[in-house]
């Protein structure tokens, strides 16, 4: 999808500069595409210019590609992530992208998103992954450093090391 709840000021979608009509990929068309490319495709990046988990079929679509032995990774603002859905989908890698360590700082770049919601969804995913160690999902948390949040980098790194994510960047 190229739909997003955020209004990030440097993103074409967020700024409203996207010239394409906002929409969601048809699940059947997606499955036809995956069937066609699966024999020669190793990796699928399940995101681009939109929030992937706004698509109501996201977890089924990811699972479909995984069943074809395609490595799937995605990137999210975290607001719509369902931890159970992530485990069901067999996603290989998810990257939560944060804009700060408090709502005011986070919301300055990740406009219209909720830091507490993203963190809660992230923590739930970590909890479930510990409960189901057979899950292969790699969890990453990103922090886009800008002048307004650079004073929080140390806090971010300390927080993520305690959190139990696989990688913080």
Image (cartoon, helix red, strand yellow):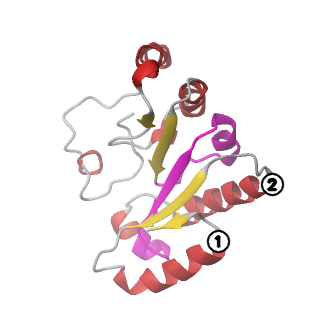
Q: Out of 24 and 65, give the one closest to the viewer.
A: 65
Return the residue at label 1.
163
SS at badge 2:
helix
Q: Name the residue furthest right.
A: 131
Residue 110 is situated, as x and y percent measured from the top left of the image, at 38, 61
**Point 78% across, 49% down: residue:** 132
Whether residue 145 can be seen here: yes
Q: Which mark is residue 67?
A: none
Which quadrant of the figure has residue 159?
bottom right
Q: Is residue 138 above or below residue 66?
A: below
Point out the tag, 1 or 2, that comes first from the N-terminus.
Answer: 2
Label 2 near label 1: C-beta < 8 Å? Answer: no
Q: Locate the C terminus and report the quarter of the image it occupies.
A: bottom left
Label 1 neighbourhood size at 10 Å, few (<14), some (14-19), many (20+)?
few
User: Is-magenta flag for residue 89?
Assistant: yes
Whether residue 26 can be seen here: no
20 horizontally vs 140: left or right? left
Residue 1 is situated, as x and y percent measured from the top left of the image, at 39, 33
Residue 34 is situated, as x and y percent measured from the top left of the image, at 46, 20
Q: Out of 58 and 65, give the one closest to the viewer.
A: 65
SS at badge 1:
helix
Return the residue at label 2.
131
- Give the magenta-colored segment's residue range: 77-106
């Amino acid at each position: 999808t190229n739909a997003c709840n955020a209004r990030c000021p440097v993103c074409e979608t967020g700024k409203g500069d996207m010239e394409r009509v906002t929409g969601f990929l048809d699940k059947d068309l997606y499955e036809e595409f995956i069937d066609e490319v699966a024999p020669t495709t190793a990796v699928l990046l399940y995101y681009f210019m939109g929030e992937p988990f706004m698509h109501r079929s996201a977890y089924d679509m990811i699972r479909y590609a995984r069943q074809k032995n395609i490595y799937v990774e995605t990137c999210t603002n975290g607001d719509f992530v369902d931890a159970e859905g992530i485990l069901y989908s067999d996603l290989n890698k998810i990257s939560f992208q944060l804009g700060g360590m408090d709502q005011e700082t986070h919301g300055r770049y990740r406009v219209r998103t909720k830091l507490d919601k993203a963190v809660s969804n992230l923590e739930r995913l970590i909890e479930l992954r510990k409960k189901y160690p057979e899950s292969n999902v790699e969890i990453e948390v990103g922090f886009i450093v800008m002048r307004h949040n650079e004073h929080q980098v140390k806090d971010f790194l300390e927080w993520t090391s305690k959190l139990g994510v696989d990688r913080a960047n």
